[in-house]
Amino acid sequence: MFYPNRTFDDPSYLADLACLASPSCLDRSGHGSRWRCAVRSRGLNGLIGIAVAMALVLASVVVPVGHATPARAEAPSVQPAAGQFYGARTRVMNGVTINAGATATVQIAGVDDLPATGLASAWLNVASRAMAAGGNGALTVYPSGASVPAATGAQYQQVGWNQDLLLVKVGSDGKIMMKNQGAGATAVKVYIDVYGYTLTSPGASAGSSYVGVTPARLANEVTVAAGGSTTVEVLGKGGVPASGVSHVAFTLTANSTGPTKLVAHASGSPAPTAFANLDTWTATHRENLALIPVGADGKVTITNIGTYPSTILVDVSGYYASPSATLAGSVTHAVQPARYGGTVNIPSDGSYTLSPLGANGIPASGVTAVALNLTMRSTSTGFVRVYPSGEALPPTRTATYPDANLTHAGFIAAKLGSDGKLVIKNWKNGAVTVTFDVYAYFSPTPSGCAAVARTRTPSQTTAGAPAKAARADADPEPYNPTTVFQASPNAVGSQGILEFAYTDGIGRLMHGRADPGALGSLQWTPIHEQEGYYGQPALGEQADGRLNVLAHNLSGDVWSRTQATKEPAAWGNWVGVQKPMGSTVTVARLDNTLVAFAVDAGGALWALPQHAANDPYKGWIGLGVAGLSTATAPLAVPVAGGLKLFFLDASGTWRTALYVGGIVSSCAVLSGPGFSGNASVVTYPGSRLRIFVRGADGHVLTKTQDGSGAFPQEWDQVGDLVAAGSPSALISPRSGKTEVVVRGADGRIHSTGETVQGTGEWRAWADAQPDASVPATDPTAFQYVGPNGPTWSYIFRTINQEMRLYWPEGESLQLKAAAPTFKGRALPKPPPAR
């Protein structure tokens, strides 16, 4: 952060501090000449003052947003929850014949190592073949105790074995039913293998959670010799992260000149030859969804256990995030299989948009993916691609119809588009009729935070409405606070560049840069291009040092822009992250990744995480907290264990939770109703937090975590000033005391601070402006490291968008009841609007 000159306090004290931190201050004997000078000139008290100040600088500097966060404890990122996935590989039906029209009962629970009770669903690979020449038909699979649904599952023929992986709800008795829908006297032989399961209640340990991805090709036309194998790298490919993955879901497509069996398994493990994933028997492509554990080397292996070579395609569509993954995925909700509408005819090279939400047991919102079975029939041959609405057509296959005038099926746990829809694209060979049967849906891992009742005001609309339509103030807001951020230094011994950002009253997004040693070097650049923005923007720094800005576009979506290069500083392109948000966006660093937060127009809390260091943002994830205010931005503070979130609900009640791994927990209520504005939080050693807010009566209130991390029930009032805006607080790098600035009811900025470090005893509020400038925005207090060491200041903008900066003078460890003297100056003006 920036300060206008180099003598904010006692210059010799700062010089001493700088010397003590610099090897160049030592003489050849290894002793510090300035240290000896300090002892001679100030005596023991001076020496102690320098030492204590140095310790404060090292121990209590608050790291600006985007810099390295405190090292966090290695704790499970996901707690046990119903619907989490546990891998398995066991046979539950072994070559049983089911006559035409007959129904078989299949025991799932308690077989081999499967749980005896509490099974919610199971991934079942169904291998089936008609017992008579020319026979073909379908198997309907559904939970025990339910009626036969108007849905199909596996399809079979007599020519060869057909493989279908399905995600099926298990009955309360631990069983599933399978009805042979074959015509005439067609009997079918069936094998069923379990590839994993979910539970109706939390397990003894956390399981994995599902993440759908936009389908991507990982292996293209690879020939696997008879008795041979090929290894496919999956981690870090096609939207799958480089770590934290237990299983990967992919469509395995293959053809061969004769009957062949393919087995998929974890790389480095022997091929389980009793569990085939795909059979081919003619010179046409056939496919099946595979759900396979990932080997220690991040790969899966495809082994050909047949007698003919086979050419394969591998198209990934999702994965299961392990409990220790950086981001948690979604839990499974299996439903009674049900059909969407009727049969759809998709012409050659045509598309159909499917809207699965709000029907057949699937909620209207909060769904990340759906498990679908596609049943297809055509007079031609070909395949369809299923992908999220709003995204580019992927070069993949989802389901194949390899035989004209025969019925085929394909299954996928498909990621939904931001509009909750899917696109089904037919290949060019001919028209195809398709039916869609839903088997399950996926929703974010439960947060542990109870939703709060939404108190709707006239300015708020229903969930899902664009933010611009939802808020009268979604037009440019001229007087939002300025964001200030000090970038990491480019070289050892240098000070990081100061970065500023704000939006003005006509929708411009202004970015400023300044050398901490030369205030007049501040240069403003409009970076909005052809778009318009409103609200306070967020600034963060990626792991590689490049600056990232997030801002609320007038369309309602949050847009992101990252520097293409840090030095020389050059911006990349704007990227819109589709989903309207009602609140301003904020961002924080968690380990080596950035995570943004915002509240949508319906009051639900969302996170926008990087999935890996320096990655682009891939999409918002719901955090399961609802009923929040859109007028207040959520605040994220790095702590040991994750990010501590603070957010205001629609009743004006402050709440807090811990974010880690894509979920929130440790939820607590901090206040009663009636509060407004934004919070400011300072961090003490040990990740202890002190929060400042504006109370219902306008007074500034505060509370601090105790040794156990809990906040007390009561608030402490900070003096008797009535505030007109939100407080901004920090720890002074010079004194180690907490300082607060706020805009008062008189329209001027006032300051207070602790009389003694860490006591929460406050000086009387004092006017912190040495001039007659009139602030039009709330102040932003910030730390920075300049040529003379760490210090602090605050800024605001006037009604004419002029930036004013103020800094304390005379601040020292001895200061108690007396307020510091502030000096100020105007910063260079932004360029005129064009």
Image: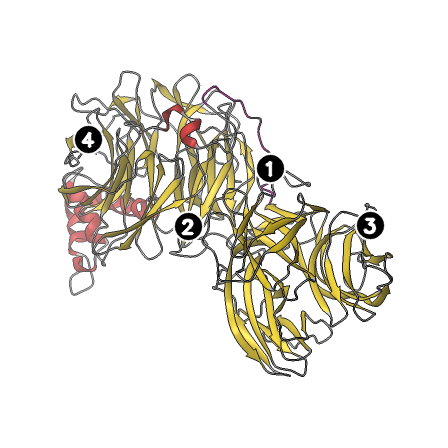
Mark 4 or 3: the one toward you:
3
- SS for tag 2? loop
Look at 59% across and 74% down and name the residue there. Answer: 301
- SS for tag 3? loop
Rendered-image quadrant of the N terminus:
top left
- SS for tag 1? loop
From the top left corner, tell me how far across and down residue 582 is, in percent: 43, 32
Does the image show residue 726? yes
Mark 1 or 4: the one toward you:
1
From the top left corner, tell me how far across and down residue 413 is, in percent: 61, 54
Crowd band around label 2 with a 10 angstrom C-alpha radius: few (<14), some (14–19), many (20+): some
Write down the residue under mark 4: 804
Write down the residue under mark 1: 364
- SS for tag 4? strand
Dot 3 or dot 2: first in sequence order is 3
Dot 4 or dot 3: first in sequence order is 3
Give the magenta range: 445-459
Q: Amino acid at mark 2?
A: Tyr
Please give the label number shown on residue 144: 3
Between 417 and 296, the one lying in front of the other is 417
Q: Is 447 one of the magenta-colored residues?
A: yes
